[in-house]
Image (spheres, rainbow, N blue to C red):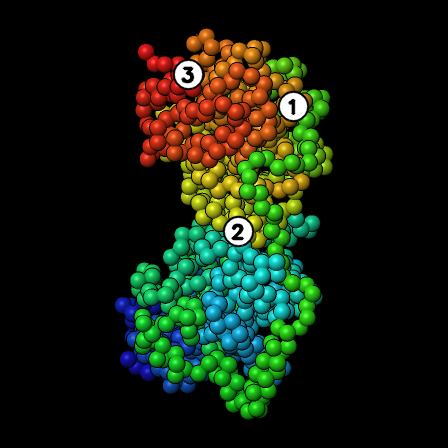
Amino acid sequence: MPAIKTVKSATLDFSSVAKLQPSIQSRTNFAPAAKVHADLTAAVKGLMGGYRLDGWRMASLDPLHNDPSDHSSIAELDPGTYGLSADESISCSVDFAGSAKVLMLPELLNRLHASYCGTIALDCAHIRASDQQRWLYAQVEGISASAALAADDALRVLEQLVLAETFEHYQRATYPRHKQFSLEGSESLVPLLAAAVEEAAHQGVEDIVLGMPHRGRLNVLKNVFDLPAKQLFSLFSGDPARAAAAWDLKDHFGCSIRKHTADGDINLLLAHNPSHLESVSPVVCGMARALQDRKTDGFSRKVMPILVHGDASFSAQGMVTETLNLSQTRGYGVGGTLHLILNNQIGSTISHPRDARSTRFCSDLARAIDAPIIHVNADDPDAAVAVARLATRYRMHFGADIVVDHVGYRRHGHFGSDDPTMTQPAMQRRIRSHRTVVRIYADKLVAYELTSGGELERVKAAASIAMIDGHAADETTMVTTSVPTRNNGQTARATKPVVTAVPLGQLQAIVHRLAAVPPGFALHAGIRKMIEDWRSVAVDADRPVDWCLAENLAYASLLANGFNIRLSGLDVGRGSFFHRYHVWHDQDADTDWQSLHVPLRHIAEGQGFFSIFESPLSEEAVVGFEYGYTLQCGRDLVVWEAQFGDFVNNAQVIIDQYIATGEHKWGYKSGLVVLLPHGHEGGGPEHSCAYLGRFLQLCADGNLRVAMPSTASQFHHLLRRQALMEERKPLIVMTPKTWLYGHKPSYSSLRDVAQGEFRPLLCEEGDIDAAAVVRVIVTSGKVYYDLLSGRTQAGLPRVPILRLEQLYPFPADALADELRRFPRLRQVAWAQEEARNHGAWPFLREQLEGALPPGVALEYAGRPAAAPTAICNAGLHMVEQHAVVISALGITAA
């Protein structure tokens, strides 16, 4: 290949580098550039494009020195691929670090190598937005071209590293019997996070919501959140009255503080989380979205979520994928999340990376959402700080996710007493002989004459003294979590009465507003008929109100009083069973989303805001997000609906670890409403059961409210009560499906909707001779109407049917009072349509027995226990349902 000898220059435009980059298969013998000017331009452009897109493949990322070293093996980084020679004196006018520069080819190669093959590696070839790529190129090239850190900044980073190391040594020496998840090997995470916080404050961020697993968590609390040592080490206390983590591990502890920075104060919130490593990710994003929605200026980027991940969990746990998929959606976007992977190159205790994932890097999952990935060597703190600032600026500039892969190692085992040599002996030999990042960085500062050789020992001594003095300080304010008083009984607690009634005239006016059609809006025939029915209800308060209107009226009346409402789930705009119609589509619009009308946004002047979002095909991340939202949204009513009740199965971790236990473990107050369509109709096990028994099994200490309303007015008042109650608890509602939504006996009059209230126990409303009653049926849900019909057909008017509308807290006193009305009572039958092991019976049996008068026997009337939740045969379903009815009525089959 002829040498290219010229000093002529070409001004290059790198807006389409990826398109012009030649491949190794299409090498061309370039003519001398003095003769063919375009060939020089293309050659230099291709070389720069090769480094920008593939330089990460040869970067020095592993502190333990397992990186590739032969750059000639990658054709895209070889000047010869483009007809160039690395030692030739070619002058090039290039766009480097965001501005035009004239560089000789050897100098250009040195700068490209420093920018893309050093301790920072930019991976953004997958990003389809060319403006984002160009911005990232300029930023990364600017880092390598910038001057060294000022002495004060360098000493500050050294101090942060020493403080991180000192904390790990101190807690291991002071609490040797406690399980500890050391940050050693990745101490530069502390200056990295500190730099992200400072840059965020500089960029105008007011709140940061942080989620992270257990490794390094306490270190971050001490050295990033500035939590005093005395308060932090109270987590190690065995005294439940003084320990914050009486109900959970210290390494799950979170807190919120207001931190001072050079650009003003910033709020930092570290979310509590369980050992389910990535479950906190959507919860943090939900918390951030709620804080964003409460900003009066509407600028969402003033609240920034930061998620710290483990390398194995980021690539392997589906929650990460679900959360990434939410990132740019309208209902769940948070203006970009900064993802930090604490990559110790081990993952779980014994797995090799090739057993943990099918990708080269643990961060490759982020490619799916066009998120740039920046790898950084954890042994280069200056690089870590620079990357933190870059990543924060990217998030603020583009409002998109970005991933920082912080590549370090784990100096000790998975926890303090773990012996890693049993599974990674070779790696541990390298670690034992490897200098700590503190020593490496101190030696670097001495070499650059930024400090003296004795500075490190001075900083270490000062850090040790500060740790000891801080731990011994007499601090009166301990870190505590507000844990509710235990309520071992399952009875309903006395709560402040809540008035859910609404003046009839106000409801009638709301109905008219709901039925108003925008001018020129072409209605669907089904909606046209619906609003005609609604208008007739508005003029006749005794006409039946269906479940659709009852729900609309609950939300509308709350909105009119200033409440904000957020509703999400699959198909919630229309409703899976055509049961809602919150969002109307113009039938003449050119596109399905061109013209929409949401009646609940037009109820009253100054009303609260009604948000409704169709969720992605996800349950776990979405429920986690909505739960997190409730923690920061004040008194807003937040509702999530499963398309079918059993789909909530996919969110079991969020239910078990957050919704059911978050208040008692961490003091989290959530008023989340979970609507779960539930009921047997012969539709099969995947569309029948919302696992009522599982939710009741989780009930204790007043942690949840579980209800199964059987009338439209009960549903209406239940939703209003949830918003109006001062005591916030998650509400689980077993809502009806197709059969009951179109079942007129379950409808209520507008007068009942206006004047009534939610009643946990519905008693027999007809005239009945209490002295003649020997048998009473207690039931819940839509099976009540089968029992009612069966009683009429059998001619048994003396068998009252009581409905438990709220199963937890259990209305024991109300039930006991009602049963005492029947002096000759001998049998009480609990009737359910679910299988014996899937319904409420296992939980309620003890509660029901406690409410029985002396001498009264309790019977079970329902399907036998079964592995599946329901059958998929309509005929057999009817046979079984009839058997439940006659058993509950005490009729002996012929």
**Which type of secondary structure does the marked residue at label 1 adopt?**
loop
Looking at the figure, which quarter contains the N terminus?
A: bottom left
Q: Amino acid at mark 3?
A: Gly
Q: Nearer the viewer, residue 862 or 781?
A: 862
The residue drawn where x is 57% and y is 64% is 237
**In the drawing, what numbered circle is on residue 420?**
none
In the rendered view, would you say 331 is above or below 175? above
Determine crowd level at label 1: few under 14, some 14-19, many 20+ residues with C-alpha closer than 10 A.
some
Which mark is in front, 3 or 1?
3
Q: Which residue is mark 3?
A: 890
In the rendered view, would you say 634 is above or below 441? above
Q: State the CA–CA distance, disc 3 to disc 2.
A: 49 Å
Looking at the figure, which quarter contains the C terminus?
A: top left
The residue drawn where x is 43% and y is 19% is 888
Q: Quadrant of residue 305?
A: bottom right
Residue 324 in percent (x, y) is at 46, 53
Q: Amino acid at mark 2?
A: Val
Q: State the CA–CA distance, disc 1 to disc 2.
A: 36 Å
Mark 3 or mark 1: whose residue is earlier in sequence: 1
Q: Which residue is mark 1?
A: 756
Determine crowd level at label 2: few under 14, some 14-19, many 20+ residues with C-alpha closer than 10 A.
many
Q: Amino acid at mark 1?
A: Gly
Q: Nearer the viewer, residue 194 or 706?
A: 706
Q: Quadrant of residue 62?
A: bottom left
**In the drawing, what numbered circle is on residue 283?**
2
**Which type of secondary structure does the marked residue at label 2 adopt?**
helix
The residue drawn where x is 35% and y is 21% is 880
**Residue positioned most to the front:** 855
Which mark is in front, 3 or 2?
3
